[in-house]
Amino acid sequence: MTSVRVTDLVKDYTLRSGLKRTRLRAVDHVSLELVPGRTVALVGESGSGKSTIAKILTRMERPTSGKVDVRLDDGAEVHGAAYRREVQMVFQDPFASLNPFHSIEHHLARPLRIHKRTRTKEETRERVLEMLERVNLTPAENLAPRRPHELSGGQRQRVAIARALAPGAQVLIADEPVSMLDVSIRLGVLNLLGRLQREDDLAVLYITHDLATARHFSDEIVVLYRGRVVERGPSDAVILDAHHDYTKLLAAAAPDPERPGSVAADRGPVDRDAIDNSVCYDHFAGEWREAGVPAAETKERTA
Amino acid sequence: MTNLEPAVEATAADTAEPPAEASGDAPVRSGWRMLLPTMTPWLATGLVLIVGITLFGLIGPFLVGDPDQIRDMGLTGPSAEFPLGTTQIGQDVLAQLAYATRGSLEIGFLVGVLATILSCFFGIYGAYRGRFVDEAFSLLSNVFLVIPGLPLVIVISGFVPRESRGLWTIAVVLAVTSWAASARVLRAQTLSVRNRDYVAASQVSGERPWRVITVEILPNLLPVIASQFVFAVIAAILGEAGLAFIGLGASNSSTLGTMLFYAQNGFALPLGAWWWFVPPGLMIALFGMGLSIVNFSIDEIINPKLKNVRLHRRQARRAARRERRLARSSRGAAGGVPEPEVSDR
């Protein structure tokens, strides 16, 4: 069991155009917590900082400031190679996240070997087949020697999920795991993720821009807008009782099957710059707070 | 994911995914096959040229006499005893050609390997590390790119005393002056490959940098590396011939270039002794042509435009085959004579 506590994460990118340098704050004082067995959905539009948070959590990027604290059950902090074992990621595009040159078996065997989960070749092979079966890829013996291009998108994403779990990961970052898949197989992959989470008691960060699946598959929703958290709370509360303008906009943008013909465009163009991302509604506290400031200093605010 | 209704695992959507593909007895194709060019008449011509000349260089020297043996018959044209005639001092041109081909191939291969190693290191490693290392390596290869190759080679070869100017010296000199262009090509390719998700995924799973480079990135660059290697071999053989022709070749080996050098010194052209200078010249030209043709075929794999053409061709062939099979089976049912199977490979 491993939990992650992210405190006041800030990531600045330096943009250069000619001699001018400007700073872009992609993530601005974001705090969140991942607990075993629970799913936190990170919702927001493109460029809101979702993927940057994923990259920082998987240590592909260094945060400008802030802290990512990964702890085991006994309170021991996770460092170095162990971090790679504990925190794993499922990428968005299953057509890009598997190496076209290597077999499916290679993709699953490498993490096992790196983290010394298996000792011998035979043991590794056995484990690879076991893992393929675990993500419903059968017959495993038949699929293991294949190349990624011989598999469908859904099958590839299952392989990617198996790979992420291969080192024995307890924290899973799923960066839009179904957005590149056919609508018809999305549910299957999400249900698979759900089952694996229950079996292994995983802490999951589900990154998406799709409010409907976020509500369905997560316990908590954190809404990001331009790098700041603008609303957080239990998933039903955030969706059904949206307080922040941006969350309302997101909720309205999702087509509602019960109201045919209803689309968000009905309400006319929205002035996005007018949306205020300096305040955040916290459903747990039931109050407005300041956004984009260190967590310890957030004061209650009336919006 | 607590909002799930229980036991929704095996939903219709889950099973709707095509499982047939997985369970069939489809042949397991290796990744290497995707890297091999399709066999075309052009490729076959190139391969025949290369293999023929290589065999001549490997086996020829054992079948001919001593190339340095001097006879008092002077310059004579082709005859039954000497199929390619003799030189001014009565040396067998065919024997010389065999040894010279071996020498040129040796140097071409050696330089090809050295230049490829250098360009892989500076191109791939630099691009993978990025930032300062990339900038430094780029600068270095740019500098080497603008240094005029042949003059530098002449200067270096001229600087090294003749006694110590062996095969390796010439090979190193040629390799050092010729790696830069392919390093730039490899750098560009690596920049594109290293940003793919599968590289990030292997980093996230804890793979060491050298393994990411050699196991995840390098195989995807193999066609490019092969093509750069072929170019390096051509350039090396030509470069060495040029050096040897002006008398700066390796002192202890005979190559096609040294043959041309002696032919020039022996006034082969004014004397009309075509059998002395045409064979080595033709050998260089044919080998270069063979390598270039092979390179064009490799280009089919690298060049995205041609790659699609190749895929479409494959699909068309497969469709044609299926159609033939259908036609055959329907005719077979009608009692007709089955058409002989036409192989498409």
Image (spheres, grey):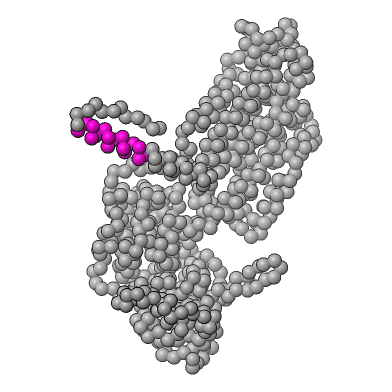
Q: Residue at x 78, y 19 (%)?
A: B265
Location of residue B28 with respect to B47 vertically, above or below? below
Describe residue B25's horizontal placement relative to residue B285 as left or right: left
Confirm whether residue B300 shows in the render. yes
Left or right of A142 in this view: B150 = right
Q: Which of the pair B16/A267 is nearer the observer?
A: A267
Q: Is residue A186 left or right of residue B59?
A: left
The residue drawn where x is 58% and y is 75% is A25
Magenta span main SS: helix
- Rendering coords of residue A126 (x, y %): 32, 52
* x and y, in percent, of residue B241 in the image: 70, 28
Residue occupying the point 72% across, 30% down: B242
Any magenta on residue B319? yes
Looking at the picture, tell me which residue is in the foreground, A23 or A193.
A23
Q: Position of residue A66 (x, y in %)?
A: 54, 77
Expressed as whole percent of the image width and height from the top left, the position of residue B162 reads 78, 29
Q: Which residues are magenta?
A: B318-333
Q: Say which of A160 and B271 sits in front.
A: B271
**Quarter of the figure with the N terminus of chain B:** bottom left
